[in-house]
Image (spheres, rainbow, N blue to C red):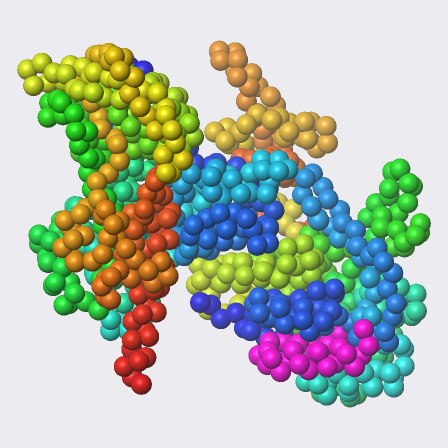
């Protein structure tokens, strides 16, 4: 795929078209409206899917959008980024009789209506005089903020970046999730009186102690950091990039020119790697290859993401690991790879890749994009003095409470990781549940005090 | 939130959605579940002398992939003893004092029998009575139900008997199995009924088994006509409600029944004069939970229109419903096909060409080879058929063409001709 600069912006617009009005109505009427429906159980946020679809069928789009957003404060984003074939659509009973309902697209149909009509779906609760600080305005943070505001809390969200929304605003390619969708979700929360203090770093601009002093409870929803170092020679060369930063740039500001006609290697095979690869293609790269030390079977990218990347012309090289990055005059010119083979299974059941000695070879590339996961925000977590295991905050799974009685945690910071990527919808669920746990604790406390 | 409370002839209800007297309201367990789900009221399954039901009772009309467009049943009134029903009704009313509980009644044509049952059900605290003069099967063979509902004088007399003792409002449920429902509605009104409800079910045979040559459903090799309801009967019911609503000789509130499945259906009945609606088939198809969207959708509708109370829309379209002779002969609409959304299925063309007025041409663009559907407006009679068969909503629009002529109805035209004829 070779592209001209002027055409590229178009390539970053949402790739999947919305359902046409007739399509949405036909599909909504095809839903069986199951009782105790498996799709609801398959949704981490338990959206009442048959109900929101029924509301599309009866022309109650407002009610439909509210049903979705009530259960999932980032439901418009999730309509686009959820691996629906593994969740709701995978559970649809029609898989056995015909084909599953297009739940994700119907969810988008309803939430698009709410966005277009600027519908105010929720009202703030009556003020209860209690305050909560939320650190991080990603899916978990804004979900918690929305719930707490509806319960009457005075909520302040601290966000290091310029805009709120976290991964949805910055980290998912715009052709899957346009930034304005995420910003609408933020706006819905802000309209309930939640204060967003952006460009504000906790630990730098405001200290953990101040938060504990000034708020009744603190919720840590800080997510994850940058992509870690590969730990190989040549990593400092110009042309070695971080996948998250690369994606983020395409969602903010002008598209970079230096990828046009170039060769790009992406290290890793998770969803971020796919995003970086498809971004690179759309930025104009001539050849984009994903390099992964295991095989297709072990990669964590969703099947539809993998398919999407192949459609974009991304090439996949299995069983190769980077050994060093080669450069001339401080710029990347190639990457040396070692061929791998799969050995014994590790504790998570994935077969461990092992290098084949003497198999090294060099591939000519202009850019190396690292997408091998994200670092834990250890210093920030430790500054709160709470218990954690390798950066995964320890919580009581029912109360979302950390080892500190007034500090709670939700989202990626409590997700143990493993063979699968944490989903946006999981973070939303954590945030929602943490909010109710905070409410239960603070209400309990008030009840005790008034005894 | 708009005010969804209704007042039907003095019967108050938290919302206009009631369950009709039918299988869903057979027991306290069911009615209590319905109230929990949000139904504003329930008309308990008809009380009377306990009967014996047959097995194999229901059948449905499925069409074009949609299930239960129509529904038919041969189940009779309650088959449970009166004292059991009364006990459960009392218990239900106690648990849900704000919800509306109506007793549906059907007894033999005897004054004492009506007095007796009215006193019994009112003693347990029902909010109103509904006299079942509509059931078309089984009970009619015994001189009750629609056998009464087809005779205005019988209706009048039995309503009078009930009104002699009734302390609560009396609703008369009418059968549609009659040539002109206004005659029985007027009779109910003359007898002193506080309200009427319509329609009960329509005589029907759902189908015939092609291999066994048996009616559907059958009971041990024999079938009998059932009562038809569900979405398919809505237009029939809506007309009957509207006809009664605009008849000054009826003049009492109406509880609308017949194929109501969504909040939209309910709004239509309310606009055409119903003060509330009763639902059965939709609940039997999907469960009591459907009321959630009925309430939510109605509330959204009212809020978006800036209407404070649902009572404010009751009957608002009745004045627009009239007789054919009062329609403007000089009003003209024609079809316009929006090419940008047309998918070239040509259904409008063939419908018009074969069965209407031959005014939609398929025109081939010589340059591109593409075909377009074009209405010859001068030949279009504005029948709507093309827009009805068009599968893409909004693609064929019926547009008004000003004729420049003053409005003239058939009645006015005939009157003018008559007076003109007189002067000649």
Quarter of the view holding residue B400: top right
Q: Is residue B84 magenta?
A: yes
Q: Residue at x 73, y 81 (%)?
A: B87
Provide residue B120's location: percent of width, then percent of height.
77, 86
Provide residue B246's location: percent of width, then percent of height.
68, 65
Region in magenta: B80-105
Q: Is residue A239 magenta?
A: no
Provide residue A77's location: percent of width, then percent of height.
36, 44
Quarter of the view holding residue A333: top left
Residue B189 can be seen, yes or no:
no
Return the residue nearer the eye: A217 or B6: A217
Q: Residue at x 10, y 26 (%)?
A: A236
Q: Residue at x 37, y 38 (%)?
A: A347
Whether residue B23 is situated above or below residue A318 in the rendered picture: below
Provide residue A348's location: percent of width, then percent of height.
38, 38
Q: Is residue A390 left or right of residue B105?
A: left
Residue at the left extreme? A329
Q: Residue at x 81, y 83 (%)?
A: B117
Task: Tell me the quarter of the image containing the N terminus of chain B.
Answer: bottom left
């Amino acid at each position: 795929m070779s592209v001209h600069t002027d055409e590229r912006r178009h390539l970053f617009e949402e790739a999947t078209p919305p359902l046409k009005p007739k399509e949405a109505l036909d599909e909504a009427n095809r839903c069986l409206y199951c009782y105790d429906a498996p799709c609801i159980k398959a949704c981490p946020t338990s959206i009442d899917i048959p109900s929101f679809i029924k509301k599309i069928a009866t022309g109650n789009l407002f009610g439909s959008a509210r049903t979705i957003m009530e259960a999932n404060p980032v439901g418009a984003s999730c309509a686009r980024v959820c691996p629906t074939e593994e969740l709701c659509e995978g559970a649809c009973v029609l898989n056995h009789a015909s084909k599953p309902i297009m739940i994700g697209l119907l969810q988008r149909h309803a939430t698009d209506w709410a966005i277009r009509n600027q519908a105010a779906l929720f009202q703030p609760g009556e003020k209860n005089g209690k305050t909560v600080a939320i650190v991080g305005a990603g899916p978990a943070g804004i979900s918690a903020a929305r719930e707490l505001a509806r319960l009457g809390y005075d909520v302040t969200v601290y966000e290091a970046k310029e805009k709120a929304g976290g991964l949805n605003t910055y980290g998912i390619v715009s052709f899957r999730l346009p930034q304005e969708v995420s910003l609408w979700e933020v706006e819905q929360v802000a309209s309930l009186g939640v204060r967003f203090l952006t460009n504000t770093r906790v630990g730098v601009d405001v200290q953990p102690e101040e938060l504990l002093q000034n708020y009744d409870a603190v919720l840590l929803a800080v997510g994850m950091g940058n992509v870690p170092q590969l730990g190989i020679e040549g990593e400092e060369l110009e042309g070695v990039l971080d996948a998250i930063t690369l994606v983020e740039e395409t969602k903010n500001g002008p598209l970079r020119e230096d990828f046009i006609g170039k060769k790009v290697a992406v290290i890793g095979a998770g969803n971020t790697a796919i995003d970086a690869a498809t971004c690179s293609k759309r930025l104009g790269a001539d050849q984009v290859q994903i390099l992964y030390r295991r095989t297709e079977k072990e990669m964590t990218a969703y099947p539809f993401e993998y398919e999407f990347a192949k459609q974009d012309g991304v090439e996949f090289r299995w069983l190769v690991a980077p050994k060093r990055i080669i450069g001339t005059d401080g710029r990347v010119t190639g990457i040396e790879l070692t061929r791998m083979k799969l050995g014994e299974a590790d504790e998570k059941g994935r077969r461990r890749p092992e290098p084949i000695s003497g198999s090294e070879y060099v591939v000519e590339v202009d850019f190396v994009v690292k997408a091998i996961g994200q670092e834990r925000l250890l210093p920030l977590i430790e500054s709160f003095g709470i218990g954690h295991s390798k950066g995964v905050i320890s919580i009581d799974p029912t109360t979302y409470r950390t080892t500190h009685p007034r500090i709670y945690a939700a989202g990626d910071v409590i997700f143990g990781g493993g063979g699968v990527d944490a989903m946006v919808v999981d973070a939303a669920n954590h945030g929602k549940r943490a909010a109710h746990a905070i409410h239960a604790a603070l209400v309990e406390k008030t009840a005790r005090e008034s005894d | 939130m708009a005010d969804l409370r209704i007042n039907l002839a003095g019967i108050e209800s938290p919302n206009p959605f009631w369950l009709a007297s039918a299988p869903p309201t057979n027991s306290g367990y069911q009615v209590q579940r319905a109230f929990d789900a949000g139904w504003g009221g329930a008309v308990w399954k008809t009380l009377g002398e306990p009967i014996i039901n047959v097995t194999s009772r229901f059948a449905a009309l499925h069409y074009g992939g949609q299930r239960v467009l129509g529904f038919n049943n041969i189940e009779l009134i309650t088959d449970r003893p009166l004292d059991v029903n009364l006990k459960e009704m009392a218990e239900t009313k106690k648990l849900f004092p704000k919800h509306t509980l109506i007793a549906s009644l059907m007894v033999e044509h005897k004054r004492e029998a009506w007095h007796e049952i009215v006193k019994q059900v009112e003693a347990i605290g029902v909010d109103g009575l509904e006299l079942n003069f509509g059931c078309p099967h089984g009970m009619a063979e015994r001189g009750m139900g629609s056998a009464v509902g087809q005779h205005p004088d019988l209706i009048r007399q039995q309503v009078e008997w009930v009104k002699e003792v009734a302390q609560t409002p009396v609703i008369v449920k009418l059968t549609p199995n009659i040539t002109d429902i206004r005659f029985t509605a007027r009779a109910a009104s003359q007898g002193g009924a506080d309200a009427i409800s319509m329609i009960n079910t329509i005589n029907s045979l759902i189908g015939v088994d092609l291999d066994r040559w048996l009616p559907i459903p059958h009971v041990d090799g024999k079938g009998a006509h059932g009562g038809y309801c569900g979405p398919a009967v809505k237009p029939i019911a809506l007309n009957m409600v509207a006809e009664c609503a605009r008849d000054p000789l009826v003049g009492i509130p109406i509880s609308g029944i017949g194929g109501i499945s969504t909040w939209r259906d309910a709004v239509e009945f309310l606009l055409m004069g119903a003060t509330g609606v009763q639902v059965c088939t939709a609940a039997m198809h999907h469960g009591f939970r459907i009321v959630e969207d009925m309430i939510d959708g109605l509330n959204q509708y009212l809020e978006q229109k800036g209407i404070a109370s649902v009572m404010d829309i009751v009957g608002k379209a009745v004045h627009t419903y009239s007789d054919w002779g009062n329609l403007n002969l000089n009003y003209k609409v024609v079809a316009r096909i929006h090419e940008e959304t047309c998918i070239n299925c040509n259904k409008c063309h063939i419908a018009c060409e074969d069965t209407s007025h031959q005014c939609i041409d398929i025109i081939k663009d010589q340059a591109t080879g593409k075909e377009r559907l074009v209405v010859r407006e001068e030949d279009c009679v504005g029948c709507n058929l093309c827009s009805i068969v068009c599968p893409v909503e909004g693609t064929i629009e019926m547009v008004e063409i000003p004729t420049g002529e003053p409005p003239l109805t058939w009645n006015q035209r005939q009157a003018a001709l008559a007076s003109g004829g007189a002067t000649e």
